[in-house]
Image (cartoon, rainbow, N blue to C red):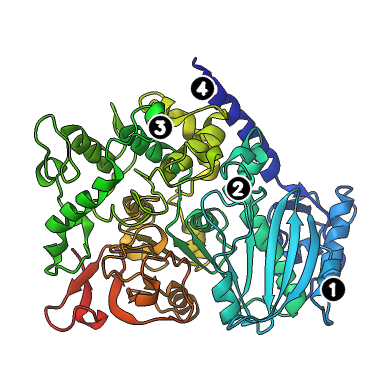
Amino acid sequence: MTKHKSRARKNSSAIAAVCASLLAPLPIFAADTAPSQIYPPNMKFADVFGRAVEVRRSGTNALIPDPTLADAEKASADVRSNVTARDAVRAVMASVAPGPVTCAGLTSLKLPWVRITSAEEVAAQKSAMAYCKVLATVDKEITVEVDLPSGWNGKFLMGGSGAFLGDLNNGSKPVALVRGYATAVTDTGHLIPKDIPGNSWAYQNPERLLNFGHRGTHLAQATAKQIIHAYYKRPIRHAYFYGTSGSGRQAMMEAQRYPDDFDGIIAACPTSSSTRGSGLAKAWTQQQMFPTLEDQTNYRPVVPPEKVKVLDDAVHKKCDGLDGLVDGIINNPLACKFDPYKDLPKCSAGKDGPDCFTPRQVEVIDHIHKGPSNAEGQVWVGMPYGGENIDGQWTGKSGGAVVGSPEANKNPSIKPYFTRNYFMANESLKYFIFGDPNYDLHSFNFETDIPALAVSAAQLDAVDPDLSGFQKRNGKLLVYAGWSDWSINPLSQIDYYERVSAKMGGRDKVADFARLFLIPGNGHCNVVDSSKKVPNVVDFLTELEGWVEHGKKPESIISSHVVAEVGSRLGPSGLPIEGQVDRTRPICAYPTVPTYKGSGSIDEAANFTCKAP
């Protein structure tokens, strides 16, 4: 057995043991105090307190494994267990009794397994409302921020940050404070390291790994709801989650594991798989582009950054006009049959140059787009052509996922991470899979090492196609990604949607509660090529509200190109557009694609329709 296989097995055993202990039901007393009307009697106990419990029915030995509050009220009062938890339950029920609660007064709120550390008023700024900012710690170290606007609209919108989380950067906070949502975010129980902002926090700490995987988000939303109830003294009308990138994975986890937490969920550019997607697939691109560790750390890519635009131009030359319009946008990359061996300009034998590709460079481009494989076949989906030159995808001013740039990181401590894929994959393999701070992805063997991912994947990867729980509670899931997203790969989202459809009775049935939208010309989380007129501003939140609250299923959604925002990473939208809109296009529900009607301005969405390719 190799050293890395042994470490992976040891790491996996520790993760499994901690998962079992943290997710096991906790015996608990029911509160003698009747629940406030804010909590309906049929509400699940676990949804109020964020933990699975068991209670014993009064006068019998019968256990109720997933009680409602009404069940808990009738539970036996003579079971001797967890008196501390019983007192905490009484306290929280008393804390939501009728009567005004000030922002500062929230610090005295008693919640089970929660310490409220601060509550302060924050003044209004521009169009954002004044709000009460609450910080709390759940369990040992899960930090939650809850923001309570002065003009509450009766709804809850939870958000998050990106990558490996670890901060309170709530991407949904701006729109929440403009539109009146109470909002919350969690670091899921760890802080971003100061030296290298990766995953060293998970080293030999399977509890943090589990909290990052899914438990932290679930506990945080339950705590946020209790604080909202206590402050406003009225029920939440609707609860939503809007997550992008790393928090998009959180969003998918919520739909799969905790279907009762939210009425509607937006998973934007979700990094759904932290092992196969962020680990395995990105390791493949780096092994191809930088064949050795020395190539990676000394920045010697097979394809230099100055050739990325030449590649992108060749793809657009062949495929931009397939939809009948040469407009800088490839509407359906699946129809683009680009062959780098035939369609790229070739260098003369034995020579290299800035406007041509050597045989080795062509081979690497081909292997990267085809995706990881081994002797048994494909192990992760390939990536469509198009958008390689979008800033941050292959290369760019801020670096890039595949090729990066030598100027990407000026900090000497993180100098080896010239590319985002190297950072994401290496940190995942080091701490999530092998538990070895000295591991490097160039050691990963695609023939023998893939089984090492299994145990961590069970807690970290949001890829379960069984959404029956979310369907039964009438939840709505809206997933979107850019067709040129090299961080998450749009084909992985198609693969997941098709697996959900196969599991749950076909696309038509799934479309009633889950929809996938792929945005032409967009890279990771709405970033676009500033040299092209690509719409990337889309108000998905309003569409989700209409679906959840009024039953209006989204078939197509308008996307806008805003002059003032070209090239920026917009994140969650829903704010008023500032700037000039000079092009609109429909974003179509998969599997349909935008199709020009044949007349009228190509800058107006009304002149396009959504059709099956």
Q: Assign a secondary structure to mark 1.
A: helix
Cα separation between marks 1 and 2: 30 Å
Give the labeled residue for mark 3.
Answer: 298
Which circle's residue, 4 or 3, is located before the other in the chain?
A: 4
| Residue picked out by circle 1 | 105
**First in sequence: mark 2 vs mark 4:** 4
- Reading the chain from its start, which is encountered first: label 1 or label 2? 1
- How many numbered marks appear? 4
The image position of residue 441, as x and y in percent, is 44, 31
Q: Is residue 324 above or below residue 456?
A: below
Return the disc, 4 or 1, that comes first in the chain's sequence.
Answer: 4
Q: Amino acid at mark 1?
A: Gly
Label 1, residues with CA under 10 Å away: few <14, some 14-19, many ≥20: few
Residue 200 in percent (x, y) is at 61, 38
- Between 149 and 557, the one lying in front of the other is 149
Q: Indicate the quadrant where residue 238 lies.
A: bottom right
Residue at disc 2, secondary structure: helix
User: Real-space Cα distance between discs 4 and 3?
Assistant: 25 Å
What amino acid type is highlighted by mark number 3?
A: Asn
The front one of 504 and 212 is: 212
Determine the secondary structure under disc 3. Answer: loop
Please tell me which residue is depicted at 41% across the width and 66% down the height of the picture: 568
Tell me the residue that label 2 is attached to: 212
Q: Element type at marker 4? A: helix
* Residue in the image at 75% along x and 67% along y: 70
Q: Amino acid at mark 2?
A: Phe
CA–CA distance in space, label 4 to label 1: 52 Å
Which marked residue is nearer to the observer: mark 2 or mark 3?
Answer: 3
Marks 4/3 in contact by CB < 8 Å: the verdict is no
Residue in the foreground of this view, choosing between 286 and 147: 286
Marker disc for residue 4: 4
Where 613 falls versus 2 (above or below)?
Answer: below
